[in-house]
């Protein structure tokens, strides 16, 4: 082989190696882009699920167990009419209640969960008996509901107790899941452990509210007299 032929062959090998390196680099860049895009997409989807847990007083999304759903329905077995799930999550309580004949609504801060709940209710065939709202529970009046379900956290139960006592009709029932209300006395308790539900009758906690109002009014008069 002549020197010229050797030089030509060497040049060809260099070009081939360079082409292979560029190809591998391109594949690496594409793979990196795909991984980065996937991570970014997961962050966008997951952020609304995690964000509520960062609030001072929140309803973090913890899906209800099958036993919890059954206990709620058992507690409301003899009931009918309107029902609201405060912090409705993925809508399973609302959908289950609708299947039992309730006109059921859910209030949830997380828009992804609300959209999923609406899709799920349509898929389950109960979209005409359900409604889901993106809303802060402290900015909503629950006066129109005769049945209330709440998966609360201890930090909020005192304030929610006062709010519901002010707004609910005397015929209402309240079902608390996971954590009971601090001063109300339940008429019955169903289930055990994390699946426990406490059932409250509005007739029993309305007098408590009236006592609080009377106490506040008396204190106000005393301050004015002084």
Image (tube, rainbow, N blue to C red):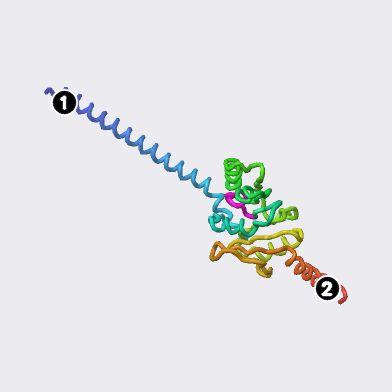
Marker disc for residue 6: 1
Comes first in the chain, label 2 or label 1: 1
Can you say whether 40 is above or below 57 in the image? Answer: above
What residue does disc 2 label?
A: 218
Q: Position of residue 221 (x, y in %)?
A: 85, 72
Q: Image quadrant for the N terminus? A: top left
What kind of element bears circle 1? helix
Q: Residues within 10 Å of mark 1 (few under 14, many from 20)?
A: few
Q: Position of residue 97 (x, y in %)?
A: 63, 51
Can you say whether 128 is above or below 167 in the image? Answer: above
Q: Residues within 10 Å of mark 2 (few under 14, many from 20)?
A: few
Q: Position of residue 36 (x, y in %)?
A: 44, 43
Towards the viewer: 21 or 95: 95
Question: What span is colored magenta in the figure?
Answer: 86-94
What kind of element bears circle 2? helix
The stretch drawn in magenta includes residue 5: no
Can you say whether 219 is above or below 6 in the image? Answer: below
Q: Image quadrant for the C terminus? A: bottom right
Towards the viewer: 1 or 149: 149
Does residue 187 appear left or right of residue 225 in this picture?
A: left
The stretch drawn in magenta includes residue 92: yes
Residue 123 figure quarter: top right
Q: Position of residue 23 (x, y in %)?
A: 32, 33
Towards the viewer: 80 or 140: 80
Q: Residue furthest right?
A: 225
Does residue 93 appear left or right of residue 10 in this picture?
A: right
Q: Residue furthest bottom?
A: 226
Q: Residue furthest left?
A: 1
Q: Residue furthest front?
A: 78
Residue 58 seen anywhere in this rendered image of the structure: no
Q: Residue at x 81, y 73 (%)?
A: 219
């Amino acid at each position: 082989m002549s020197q010229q032929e050797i030089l030509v062959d060497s040049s060809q090998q260099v070009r081939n190696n360079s082409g292979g390196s560029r190809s591998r680099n391109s594949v690496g860049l594409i793979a990196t882009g795909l991984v980065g895009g996937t991570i970014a997409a997961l962050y966008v989807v997951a952020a609304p699920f995690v964000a509520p847990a960062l609030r001072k007083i929140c309803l973090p999304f913890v899906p209800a167990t099958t036993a919890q759903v059954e206990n709620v329905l058992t507690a409301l077995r003899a009931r009918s009419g309107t029902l609201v799930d405060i912090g409705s999550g993925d809508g399973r309580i609302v959908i289950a209640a609708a299947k039992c004949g309730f006109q059921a609504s859910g209030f949830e801060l997380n828009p992804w969960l609300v959209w999923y709940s609406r899709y799920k209710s349509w898929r389950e065939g109960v979209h005409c008996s359900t409604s889901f709202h993106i809303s802060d529970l402290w900015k909503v009046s629950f006066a129109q509901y005769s049945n209330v379900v709440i998966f609360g956290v201890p930090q909020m139960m005192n304030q929610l107790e006062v709010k519901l006592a002010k707004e609910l009709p005397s015929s209402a029932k309240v079902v608390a899941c996971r954590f009971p209300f601090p001063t109300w006395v339940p008429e019955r308790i169903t289930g055990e452990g994390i699946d426990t539900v406490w059932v409250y009758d509005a007739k029993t906690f309305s007098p408590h509210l009236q006592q609080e109002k009377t106490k506040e009014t008396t204190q106000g008069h005393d301050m004015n007299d002084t």
